[in-house]
Amino acid sequence: MPELTATRLENATGRPRARVPNLFWALALTLGAAVMLFPFLWTVITSITPDGTLASGPTLLVEDPTLDAYRQLFDAMPMWRIVANSFWIAIASTLFQLITGAMAAYAFTRIAFPGRQAVFAVYLATLMVPLQVLVVPLFIQMTRAQLSDTYFALLAPSIASAFGIFLLKQAMEGVPRELDEAATLDGAHHLRIFAQVVLPLTRPALATVAVFAFMGSWNSYLWPLVVIRSPELMTLPLGLATLQGQFTTQWNVVMAGSVVSVLPIAIVYVFAQRYIIAGFAHSGLK
Amino acid sequence: MSTAPAPALGRPITEPGQPRPKRANARRRGLRTLGWALLFLLPSAIPLTAFTLVPMISSAWVSLHDWNLISPMEWVGLENYRELLADPRTRDVFANTATYILGYLPLVYIGGLGLALALNRAMAGIAFLRGAYFLPVVTSWVVVALVWQWLLSPSNGLVNTVLGAIGLPEPGWWTDPAWAMPSIILASVWKDLGFVMVILLAGLQALPQEVLEAARVDGAGAWRRFWHITLPLLSPSTFFVVVISLINGFQVFDQVNVMTGGGPAGASQVVVGQIYDLTFRYGRAGDASALSWLLFALVLVITAIQIRGQRRWVTYA
């Protein structure tokens, strides 16, 4: 996986004369980062501001900070449930996409079945179709099967992703065939070669697919908006948008909701930052 | 030197006595291969068929009908498409979507490139800085839209408070038809800047250092090195950013839906917003499906043009 390094560039830019410019860049970049991060700080500040004082305009230093907005938030929405929903739906769809994707990629690269090209072409076609084209019929399909407003409906469209299959197929083409031929000679069948030879060697691509699957599910808004009505089944983006409908001008409550939905992903991000950034960088180098 | 024809090693050596078991073996092997293929493909083939392929076909079918989601569908052929193409509202939503892209793409690309160049150096704390610029990327569109709606709130938002304090005019932002789309663009650029930065930074780090070094030795200044070497060599990453941004740009919805709901008075309504409203607000599923296919066709054509046109400006080192 192409990780973004600092060292590789030392010979390119870190020449002796770089001392003073580096100080300049350090200041400029830190200032820029502060501006970039400021909206997050502002969200937190607003969320601890008491109801009455917001109308008179915002202040950086809150005079009497309160968690009142959070109390209102948790009274208005089943927030714990919504956070838990977001997590388990994201984890489940990531696992599903990894399993279905890796197996399909293995079939397309390692099993010489008749019609392989044609089947792959159909898979590619599904990659091209945006969710917007599918939303209306998918909603009708779910409603007819009496499955709308269920966890199943929420999860169903993200069980398999043609994008992930495509990425994993590319990666598996790169695994030397001699390895699985050797395993075949040792009497291993496809499931063993898949699990013990090919899969361990495609780990970087699997990580990229996992990052995209998790983030895609975590941030997904249009499909939950269409198919979910009950607050207990909502994920964070939908819950938050619904909240805004109820508390239009109570920005402290809306911002408290934003803090609650950013916090979990920010914690994940702090620990997995290297992999997440590398995953994105990887997608651009194909 | 001529190579003698290789002995027919690959040709199956048929043993005259027993041709039949061979064929049976082959058939059994073929069946077994098919079995393995099914085992590995069904887990993805079933959901892709049920939740992508079937809806795709039924969407095309619905687009040929008038349907309010309740009463039976009524066949109208291509009438929905004809009506949509003649409707000025359709032109408006495509124009608004184009405005979004034309505002968003140059800003996010130039900003992302500047950031990538600035962050492409060895320096203490550089990983932290890159992480900070990237944080908005992992934040959901809904949160981004809400936070910016608050920052840009016309009456008591932070931006107007600051603008007022230094004596500048205070725009109505997302409540003003003229400022609604710029507000959406501003929030979107803030969110995606880190994404473009990471893609371009990865591209910068993959550049052949020898070429840049050689140009430096030859006395090419920083500006000329950037303009004549870095930028052309970076074109594959640029291409990726442009293709992805255009595809995502045409499908823009989340931030618009939350920030303005397409308003005020439809001033920021985009194509996907219109598809949503046609279906769930006006009960015109046929028109909505037809519009979604028009959008899909447009994206396909534009992506195809870009892929064909890339030969002109994309240099693969």
Image (cartoon, coloured by chain):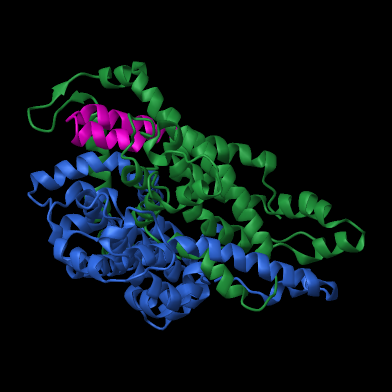
Chain colours: A blue, B green
Q: Quadrant of residue A27?
A: bottom right
- Magenta stretch mostly in which secondary structure? helix
* Percent position of residue A190, x then y: 35, 73
Closest to the observer, A6 or A56: A56
Q: Is residue A15 visible?
A: yes
Closest to the observer, B14 or B128: B128
Closest to the observer, B196 or B131: B131
* Percent position of residue A117, x then y: 41, 50
Relative to B304, is A94 above or below? below
Residue depicted at x 13% and y 62%: A232
Relative to B313, is A170 above or below? below
Q: Is residue B65 left or right of residue B300?
A: left
Closest to the observer, B164 or B85: B164
Q: Is residue A107 left or right of residue B238?
A: left
* Percent position of residue B36, x then y: 29, 66
Q: How many marks?
A: 0
Query: Quadrant where the C terminus of chain B lies?
Result: bottom right
Query: Quadrant where the N terminus of chain B lies?
Result: bottom right
Residue depicted at x 29% and y 52%: A221
Any magenta on residue B140?
no
Q: Quadrant of residue B85?
A: top left
Q: Is residue A106 visible?
A: no
- Residue that extends furthest to the right in the rendered view of this protein: B218
* Percent position of residue B126, x then y: 62, 73
Q: Quadrant of residue A262?
A: bottom left
Residue depicted at x 19% and y 24%: B65
Q: Which residues are magenta?
A: B271-298
Residue depicted at x 43% and y 34%: B97
